[in-house]
Amino acid sequence: MYVRARCKAVQALAPQLLAGTGPHSPARPGADNPVVFAGFVVTNSETGCGAAIVTPRIIARVCDNGMTITRDAMGAVHLGERMDEGIQWSANNTLDRHLELVTAKAGDAVTAFLDPGYLARLVREMGAHAGHRFTDAPKAIEVIGARLRYTEAQQKEILDHFIAGGSPTAGGIMHAVTSAAQIQDDGDAAWDLETSALDALRAAASL
């Protein structure tokens, strides 16, 4: 399960970060609409057995590209009566308190991720890498794809989106990855691709 939320009340200007997003939204090019929103994603475990993760995410208004920051994700496990095998936990005491703790931690994480200062720091950090330029895009995407284990089909999609973006920069690579993530047929594949975007940004900036 993937539940995505955005908070339009918490936004920042990110002109460096959004350079090259124009062709994804011709009527509102990124250079003229350099706004990002704060947000987060709630995911559960693959088997749905009680593990949940809250991950910060920022969203570009111009194209709806989402950039997740997995390093800051907050994970919690709520296994109900199966917290420890062989022990019958008290429903009105232990289980309730455990649920309260999980809920409180998730609330604190959301508060932190929707903080304007946190969003501003992310924009500055990502923007510092975004302007790095290179000339051989196919080779760059091939190298990055090998590092991040993209399929050949995903590399082709990323290259197509990169060319459409028109920005030969590390930021252009990142946006191509997040844009390609939006057209994946499989939800897990889309998530894996989107969560790799910041790694792709850093990898591109190192070329």
Image (cartoon, rainbow, N blue to C red):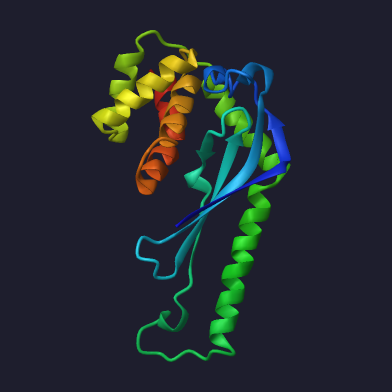
| Percent position of residue 162, x then y | 42, 19
Residue displayed at 35% across by 84% down: 85
Residue 22 is left or right of residue 136, and the answer is right
Closer to the camera, 137 or 165? 165
Residue 30 in sight: yes
| Percent position of residue 186, x then y | 35, 45
Residue displayed at 36% across by 20% down: 159
Answer above or below: position of 91 versus 193: below
Looking at this view, name the residue that lies furthest to the right.
Answer: 9
| Percent position of residue 183, x then y | 41, 35
Looking at this view, name the residue that lies furthest to the top.
Answer: 135
Residue 111 is left or right of residue 63, and the answer is right
Residue 206 in sight: no
Residue displayed at 56% across by 47% down: 56
Q: Quadrant of residue 148?
A: top left
Answer above or below: position of 57 versus 15: below
Q: Quadrant of residue 27?
A: top right
Q: In the picture, which quadrant includes the C terminus?
A: top left
Q: Quadrant of residue 29?
A: top right
Answer above or below: position of 106 versus 201: below
Q: In the picture, which quadrant includes the N terminus?
A: bottom left
Residue displayed at 64% across by 67% down: 104
Residue 66 is left or right of residue 151, and the answer is right
